[in-house]
Image (cartoon, rainbow, N blue to C red):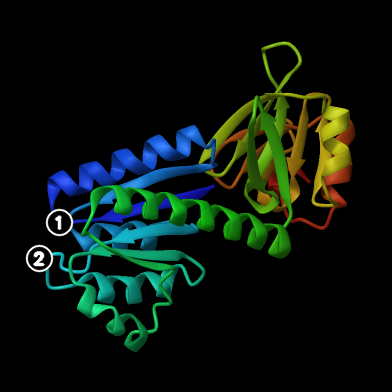
Amino acid sequence: MLKIFICEDDDIQRSRFTEIIEDFIVIRNFDMEVALAAKNPEDIIDYLSKNDISGLYFLDIDLSHSINGIELAAKIREYDPRGFIVFITTHGEMAPLTFKYKVEAMDYIVKDNYENLKDSIKKCIIDANTKYSGTINKLQKNFNIKINDRIINVEFRKILFFETSRTIHKILLHAVGRQIEFYAKMKDIEKELDERFFRCHRSYIVNRDNIEEIDAKKKVAHMINGEKCLVSARSLKQVLNSGGDFFTPSEF
């Protein structure tokens, strides 16, 4: 999922930008969300320091703060080198500074006309979605889920496990920071996954890379985020032979 960030010190404008963006991503069914709309640039930096994300950033330049938007963009680059940065500002004359700070802005939108600004924001969202989808498909594998006319991409590395849902014919995907329920069959899901996944239970497919520890006595896999996944007796030996040091010493 592509996270969207807004940093604008004017409350009315920040609310307006947020509304435009949220309405548009719903209409287009993009796998995006507004993660943070902030007045203080430090809030953006604090969020990025605690989360590994790919982002689209709409930044004002004059933030009435010790850090301006261009300096914030330079800081964002330290945490999110491939993020998409867009400046929305009344200070068109400051555009050359973006090259000086090497922030590689996607666009520079001047607040001169509301309708033009609205269209420019939408275009940036479309461009970011296209580039992001292309990048993740090249650099890493993804599990694709189709729900109605919406396609959701989940990186393999962020998937914890799949389990059969209490709702008949549905599967619940557990990933870092999100859960998604969708119609599917376990046997079909297995065909789409790579060697890091295996069927550890009739009702579960687990990503061995995200196993923290396995309690062999209780037949439970503890995942890196604290969630639990069942492991059948038959699969315990397979997990042990998978090369991961998962089992508690007391069990063997």
Q: Residues within 10 Å of mark 1 (few under 14, many from 20)?
A: many
- Mark 1 element type: loop
Q: Which residue is mark 1?
A: 9
In this view of the protein, which residue sits in the foreground, 220 or 82? 82
| Numbered tag placed on residue 156 in the rendering | none
Give coordinates of residue 6: x percent, y percent. Answer: 30, 53
Q: Could you say which quadrant of the image residue 197 lies in?
A: top right
Work out whether mark 1 precedes mark 2 in sequence or the reverse, and give the earlier one: 1
Q: Nearer the viewer, residue 226 or 215?
A: 226
Q: Position of residue 219 (x, y in %)?
A: 74, 31
Q: Is residue 14 above or below residue 215?
A: below
At label 2, which amino acid type do we have? Ser
Report the Cα–Cα distance between label 1 and label 2: 7 Å
**Residue 175 against residue 98 in the figure, above or below:** above
Compare residues 225 and 180 and report the one nearer the observer: 180
User: Please, what secondary structure does the residue beneath circle 2 have?
Assistant: loop
Left or right of residue 124: residue 31: right
Between 178 and 106, which is closer to the camera in this rendering?
Answer: 106
Residue lying at 33% horizontally and 80% vertically, measured from the top left:
98
The reply to whether residue 88 is visible in this rendering is yes
**Residue 212 shows up from this direction:** no
Which residue sits at x=78%, y=24%?
184
Which residue position is annotated with label 2?
64
Which amino acid does the dot numbered 1 rest on?
Answer: Asp
Dot 1 and dot 2 residues touching (CB under 8 Å):
yes
Residue 171 left/right relative to 57: right
Query: Is 83 rendered above or below residue 25?
Result: below
Quadrant hosting residue 182:
top right
Quick one: label 2, few (<14), some, or many (20+) residues within 10 Å? some
